[in-house]
Image (tube, rainbow, N blue to C red):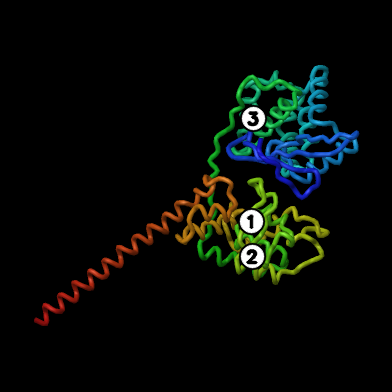
Amino acid sequence: MSKRIKTNYPGVFYREAQRITGPGMERVYYVVFKKAGKVLEEKVGRQYVDAMTPARAARIRAERIEGKRLSKKQEREKAKREAETIKWTIDRLWEEYKSQRAETKGLSIDEYRYKKYLKPNFEKTEPKDLSQFEVDKLRLKTMKVLSDQSKRHVLALLRRIINFGVRKNLCEPLLFTLEMPSVENQKTEDLTDKQLAALLKAIDEEKNVQIANLMRMALLTGMRRGELFRLQWRDINFHRGFINIRNPKGGQDQRIPLNDAARNLLKNHIRTESEFVFPGRGGQQRTTISASANDIKTKAGLPKDFRPLHGLRHVYASMLASSGQVDMYTLQKLLTHKSPIMTQRYAHLRDSALRNAANLAGTLIEKIATKGKKDAEKKTQKN
């Protein structure tokens, strides 16, 4: 068994273990507490499978001490008893799944997908009774209204709900494999020098400084939309020169360098009483900038399908890749991509830069050779 690793929360530690849902490692959290004179140690969940965090584990520990929560073993026994008497339909499983993921990022989007596409079709169905035909029927029904990526998200949610029920011993697994639609999602947005100049001009003319600086920050750092919304002043280390990205898309917290341009922007940025760098209403975490960002995009005359924030992340990556001075591994780290596969979409830009550099060598040699011939001809004419 791997060694214990302490967290900042008393009585909460984790061990590194092989991931269940994919390659790599993940944290498995445990809590230790005393009850009825006995010291108890209990596993409370995995980093990715259960979306477990140290803070959440600490709350579970407090609830176990106060007797407000059952142990994992007690939960399994209870679930087993209930499974024998209760019909665990997709809808009932969803409600249980949702209650145990109240703090999970993206739950509101999952709830929309469930109510819009899964509930009307599978609300009263138990997983063991679900057929491939019914899933294919849903796929065909959504074909005209959803992209392949969106269909994949809906089916992935259905799979997660059922897998959750199976893990909790609430239901039997599907009798077939849920096939996910293949998705070509390699769109890389980029801007010409003229378009980028127009965008920067529109940002400079934006009266809302919070919006303008947020967009500048996206271009200077390549940070994701959600990462910028969650960014707090305590995440910025001006002394050591880095930005701490909490709860990124890849899972574990990441650090990226604080470059000089971003440093100057933040030092001159209007600081409110909020803990957030780019706060929303009432100083709370921002949830959107769509209206303002789209106005800036329109004013700059950018393509309609250019996504103001995610597009700027692509521009940041494309500029670095096409410079020929940044290798793919470094770019992967700057973008906090968990896998190098995501970064490979920019490889062709780096290849182009390298080809241009290689062609430059040929051009220089050709110039030298041409100059040599001319000098030889002049010498011959003199003789």
- Where residue 242 sits in the image (x, y, percent)? 64, 62
Locate residue 237 relative to residue 91 in the image: left or right: left
Between 128 and 255, the residue placed more toward the observer is 255
In the rendered image, which residue does mark 2 sit on? 241
Residue at point 72% right, 43% down?
106
In the rendered image, which residue does mark 1 sit on? 255
Q: Amino acid at mark 2?
A: Gly
Q: Quadrant of residue 368?
A: bottom left
3D distance between C-alphas at marks 2 and 3 = 51 Å
- Where residue 294 sits in the image (x, y, percent)? 66, 57
Which badge, 3 or 1, comes first in the chain's sequence?
Answer: 3
Q: Quadrant of residue 264?
A: bottom right
In the image, residue 93 sits, relative to residue 351, either above or below, namely above
Between 184 and 32, the residue placed more toward the observer is 32
Q: Nearer the viewer, mark 2 or mark 3?
A: 2
Outermost residue, bottom direction? 382
3D distance between C-alphas at marks 3 and 1 = 43 Å
Between 157 and 203, the residue placed more toward the observer is 157
Sort mark 1 into few (<14), some (14-19) or many (20+) by Cα contacts within 10 Å.
some
In the image, residue 294 sits, relative to residue 174, either above or below, namely below
Residue at point 74% right, 62% down?
233
In the rendered image, which residue does mark 3 sit on? 141
Which badge, 2 or 3, comes first in the chain's sequence?
Answer: 3
Sort mark 3 into few (<14), some (14-19) or many (20+) by Cα contacts within 10 Å.
few
Q: Quadrant of residue 96?
A: top right
- Where residue 83 sits in the image (x, y, percent)? 79, 20
For numbered disc 2, what is the local secondary structure? loop
